[in-house]
Every structure is written in structure tokens, then in C-alpha cells.
Image (cartoon, rainbow, N blue to C red):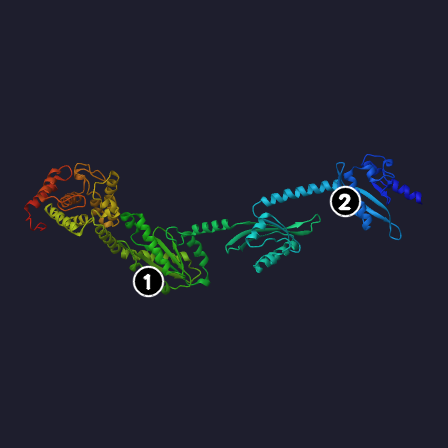
Amino acid sequence: MENIFKLFLKNIPFPIWIKGLDGKFKFVTQEYVSIYKKDISDFIDKKNEDIFDRELVEKYNSHLNWVVKNKKARTQEGYLNGEYRECTIFPILNNEGNTIAIGGFIGNINDIKVKDKEIKEQRNIINTIIDTLPGVIFYKDINHKYVYCNEGCKSFYRQKGIKNIIGKTDLEINEDKKLAQKFISDDIYIIKNKESIYNEVAFTLENGSKQYREVAKLPALDENNDVMGVVGISRDITAKKEFNNKLKYLSYTDILTGTHNRAFFEEKAIELFKEENFPIGVIMGDANGLKLINDSVGHLEGDKLLKNIANIIKESCKDKGYVCRIGGDEFVVLVPHADEKYCEIIIKDILNKCKNKKQDFINISISLGASTTDNINKDIHQTFKEAEDKVYRQKLLQEKSIRSAIMNSLKVGLETKSVETEEHTERLVKNALKIGKKLRLTMAELDELILVAKLHDIGKIGISEEILLKPGKLTNEEYEIMKSHTEKGFRIVQSSSELIHVARGVLTHHERWDGNGYPLGLKGQEIPLLSRIVSVVDSYDAMTNDRIYKKAISKKDAINELEKNSGTQFDPDIVKVFIDILNREDPYNFFKIE
């Protein structure tokens, strides 16, 4: 039997050795000695000192002494002949438990080590890639504890004041327990159903600010298709959400007035049209005189008017309805749970606020109408049409007086600019009438002549005071701007269809008889008669009264100037008539009308 054991040990295809307590080799296998490229005879009855170099001897003896002393096996790893080895040394004990020899065997773990190294390197590469990816990436086991998280995840939780999340659940790391429980419930669903979940979540950071994140979680499956845990990917969408909110705001907001726009109105009208919101009131409004203001004092003033009206409507409808600007000068208010009486209260409040609100030289005015629906068969757009009809009927009744009031406000504004005084206008009207009567104009033509005289410079309301009141000579650029007052005035006056002839007089009062005037370069009889009259009396008045840029001259010198420019700047016939009038007038009753 003993021989069988010896043969068994000898034929074991593994590196095995046995040493006595004296440290000498008693048995070695061929596999063992082959590692050191020696023969069996080189080991038997030899000590480590006889075979290995000093460094290895010290290392081997240290392990041997530890095993003898502790009577326990000891395993050490090493790198030998270009391969990883694992050496296990163990005591050989007799029945009394005493150590009678030392045994050892060597295992080749090179493949395992190489594989482990490759796995570690791959894991490091993967971790590096994951850490450099934008966003938060994590892995939780089936008990909902965090097992792994990338650098983005660590950074996110550091912002919340949490240094480490590994081994913890969401309930342990989130102050918002309701949200934490939601995360765990999602994990349970994913593990149970092997399905992914996508959420949008709002987090509160340590500084109190809100951060919005898009979270995708999916099951991690093993080779048997069993769920090992949950993988999560989360990215910050705060900027995207803010951008979308801004885009939504811009899509549904009128930028000029800050009210809602037409697109919002169309959607909200559909959304509100439910019995639970009945009755629904629709208040329609149309700003009065916007075109006239744009043409007279410019679009900036027109924009200011719209803003003022919008602010008044928003103030009157605060928490009551949705204010929308649906066109250039059109507003509409959708008011749920509002009958016509309630809408009328809102309308009266808007009109009162308009009366009390002033905008430079212009009275703020808006025409309003309202209609309601409490019938599922009468939609918002039908109701809107009814309200719109009421507005336009009101505008037809008010238009003339409103336009007249605006025109008067503009005229007062022109006087306020110290450009045209009331006395100057009065003198022009009186002198123009004298000429008109001498030329035997009809009463209608005289009425128009009065209006041309009064409104000829109304376009100057749209010229800046820096140019109007400049004491010195105007630059070429400033002069061109000044010349535009004829066209501005034309647009203002022609807003009244019944004043079209007056508008032409306003447009052409700076035309010259020789064709060198502006803005049209008309010549001789091409120039409207009313313009030719106003041109003469306006020039005479400018010469005989002090202006910012020059002192007045005498009546005689003014007459000489009229004669000098007769046939070039002025209509010679009108100059002759006017000079005759001036020469026959009593100098002490200068403006007496015959």
C-alpha cells in the first residue's frame, strides 16, 4: 500500500513537494522541478539555501517558519518564469497533532490573473468612459441600494450635501421622502415587469434652486434573463425646460403689450368652451385712432398707446379673464363664468381708466363690445363675432368725434411744442380768408381753406423738438427730416375721408410756382389753389413775426420779398391780390376782414 501511495504522489501531474522539519526536500514531483528547469536529484535532501538565491531563500523560509509556528496552511501569489503562480504551504500533522513534515503545491493562475487584469482594465476603461459621459449614471441592486455611480452622479449628490450614496437607498439620501418612495416604486415595477421607465423629475438643490432632470431607468438582466438590478441614466434638462417655457411664452404672448396673442386665444377658446365654464363672456375692443397716431407722431407713440390700453385692460380683468391682442389694434378678453351684466361692469371700468390715463397730447380711447354664450351650440367664435359687430357699430357712431378729438389733441400738442402758436394760426386764417373772398371762393372752398390754414403744419407733431426748435441753420439731413412734415400732415388729415381736399392742401403747401418746391415738385396751376394761398400768407406771417431762427422784418420789407419771389416761389396773381389787400388796410386795424 505504501508503494501505491508513493507511485500516486510521483505521478500526480502537479508541482508538489514535501520537506522535513530540518528544511530538506524529501519528495518533489517532476512538474515542480520543471518550473525551475532542474532535475529531481537537484532537490532531494537539499535545503532552500542549496538551490535558490538569497532573496528567494529568505522569502521561502519566512513562509515555512510561519506554517510550522502556526500549524496552518498559507497561500501566497507570485510571478515566476513569466507566469503568475499560487503557492500553498501546509503542515503535515500526525495523529497527535504534531507537525512531522511540511508539504506544498504550486498552482498556475496565470490565465486567471491575465483574465482578471483584462477585466479590470476593461472595467477601468468603461468607468472612465461613463465618468466622462454627460449626465448621471447609476446602478442599484434588487434591494434598491446604490452599487455604482459615475462622477456625474457623485457631483449631483454633492450639490445636495451628500458625500456618498453607495450602499444607500433613495429614502436615505433624499429629503423629499415622497419623491424617494416614487423612485423605489419605479424600481419595483421595473424589476417585476422587466420594463423601462422614463420620468421628468424636479430636484431642489442645497442652495434652494430647482433643477429639472430627465430620468430613464431600465432593468439589468443576467445570462438567465433574471433581473440583477436597475440601471439609471439622468440628465439635466433645466436649460432645455427654461428654453421651452420661454418658447411657449413667446408662442402665446404678444411681445409688444405683454398680453396673450391670437394663437393663445384660439387654443384657450376651445379649452374654455365647456358647460362647466358657462356662461362665457367675450369682450372685444378696438383701439381708436391708432393709424392717425402712427401717421402723425410715429409708430413708437402708437406702440405706447397700445401698451397703455393693454395695461388698462389687464388691470381691469386681473384674475377675471384672459386678455389677448389678436390684431394691430384689436383686443379680446375671454371671461369664464360671466354674463353680459358682468362684462358691462368690466367694460365700464376699462373706459373709466382710459379717461383717467393720459398719454402726452393724446386721449386714450377704445371702443368695446361684449357678448356671452351659455349654449353648447353657440361657440366662442360666434360670440366673438357678435361682440365684434357691437364694437364696429359703436365706432361708426363715435368715429367722427373721436377723430376730431384726436386731431384737436395733435393741434394742441403742436402748440405745446412752441412751433405754431394760436395767434399765428389765427392770423393765417384771417389773411387766407381775405384772399379767398377776393378770389370769390365758394363757402365750401372757404371752409376748406380755413382747415388748410389751421392744419398745414400739423405734420410737425412728428418732428423732434431738437430740429423744430433749433436756433441755427439746419443740416442737410435735418432739413430733409423737416421737409417730411408735409407728408406726415397729409397722412394725418386724410384719415378723415371728408377732408381729402384739405389733405392735398396740407401736402402741397410747400410747392413752388416754378416747380422747385416739395414734396411733389408741382408747378404753376398744378398746385392746388388752397395751397398757393396758404403758402403766401404763411411766408408773410413768418417774415413779419419773430421766429427762433430769425427776427421779424417790417411790413414793407415783407411786401418787397413777396414781389421779389412772385412768379418763382409764389403764384403771381395771389401775391398781387394779397399786396393790394395789405396796401389798402389800415395799419392799426391790420386783420380787419372786409
Residue 387 showing in the rendered view: no
Mark 1 touching mark 2, by CB under 8 A? no
Alpha-carbon span between mark 1 and mark 2: 97 Å
Relative depth, front residue between 520 and 41: 41
Q: Give the farthest residue toward the bottom.
A: 341
At x 90%, y 42%, the residue is 6
Q: How many marks?
A: 2
Relative depth, front residue between 294 and 227: 227
At x 26%, y 55%, the residue is 402
Residue 389 showing in the rendered view: yes
In the picture of the structure, the residue carrying the numbered disc 1 is 348
Considering the numbered disc 1 on the image, is that residue within a helix, a strand or a loop? helix
Relative depth, front residue between 556 and 586: 556
Label whose residue precedes the other's in the sequence (1 or 2): 2
Question: As drawn, is 504 to the left or to the right of 382?
Answer: left
Question: As drawn, is 355 to the left or to the right of 558?
Answer: right
Question: As drawn, is 89 to the left or to the right of 157?
Answer: right
Q: Position of residue 37 (x, y in %)?
A: 81, 34
- In the rendered image, which quarter is residue 10 located in? top right
- In the rendered image, which quarter is residue 116 located in? top right
Residue type highlighted by circle 1: Lys
Residue type highlighted by circle 2: Gln
Question: As drawn, is 333 to the left or to the right of 355?
Answer: right
Q: Residues within 10 Å of mark 1 (few under 14, many from 20)?
A: few
Q: Which mark is residue 76?
A: 2
Q: Position of residue 123 (x, y in %)?
A: 66, 44
Q: Which mark is residue 180?
A: none
Instruction: State which quarter of the image contains the N terminus.
Output: top right
Q: Against 73, is 52 above or below?
A: above
Q: Residues within 10 Å of mark 2 (few under 14, many from 20)?
A: few
Relative depth, front residue between 238 and 570: 238
